[in-house]
Image: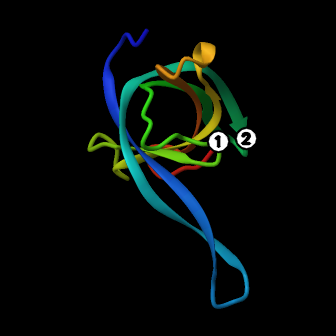
Amino acid sequence: MLVGPRVNLLLQRGTYVKDNMGGSVVTWKDLALLGGVFSNLSGVEIDAYSKASVKAKYKFEIDYNFSVIPQEADQLVLITTSVPTGQRIFQITWIKNPGMLNRNLTLVLDELKQPGGETS
């Protein structure tokens, strides 16, 4: 059951394209704007290189959308005006379809880009 504050996250899918140097870079394409309930699952404080940080896992529950289905390689972007960079980026690490009923999806997320531009 979806209980809590609802937010909209932008679902993006990455594709690899070759650059001019012979390598490859990831380009992200916007797929859909997903509305759902966003909540914190767990958090751990990390002290690395004399810098305190928090590594957190989040849960995002959405109604099942048959037009686009998230994959574990996708990322979700929370666009907000409350942080200086204007967005927070999350990597999908796990997807659960309870009972395989195709009613709602539970996505477990790791934050890639934290407010202020740091990466975890």
Q: Which residue is mark 2?
A: 48
* 55 and 75: which is toward the camera: 75
Please indicate whether residue 105 sits to the left or right of residue 53 in the image.
Answer: left
The percent position of residue 118, horizontal first and vertical second, equals 54, 50
Q: Which residue is mark 1?
A: 72
Tag 2 secondary structure: strand
Q: Report the residue that reaches farthest toward the left.
A: 81
The percent position of residue 53, horizontal first and vertical second, equals 61, 35
Residue at 73%, 46% (x, y): give it: 49
Q: Earlier in the sequence, mark 1 or mark 2?
A: 2
Under mark 2, the amino acid is Ala
**Is label 1 in contact with label 2 (beta carbons under 8 Å)?**
no
* 57 and 12: which is toward the camera: 12
Which mark's residue is nearer the viewer, 1 or 2? Answer: 1
Please indicate whether residue 9 sits to the left or right of residue 69 in the image.
Answer: left
Vertical placement of 9 versus 5: above or below?
below
* 105 and 27: which is toward the camera: 105
Tag 1 secondary structure: loop
Please indicate whether residue 82 sits to the left or right of residue 96 in the image.
Answer: left
Residue at 57%, 48% (x, y): give it: 74
Q: CA–CA distance between discs 1 and 2?
A: 27 Å
The percent position of residue 30, horizontal first and vertical second, equals 41, 56
Under mark 1, the amino acid is Glu
Vertical placement of 119 versus 110: above or below?
below
- Local crowd at mark 2 within 10 Å, few (<14), some, or many (≥20)? few
- Local crowd at mark 1 within 10 Å, few (<14), some, or many (≥20)? some
| Quadrant in which residue 4 is drawn | top left
- Image mark for residue 13: none
Vertical placement of 87 versus 101: above or below?
below
Vertical placement of 111 versus 60: above or below?
below
The percent position of residue 18, horizontal first and vertical second, equals 65, 81
Residue at 47%, 21% (x, y): give it: 104
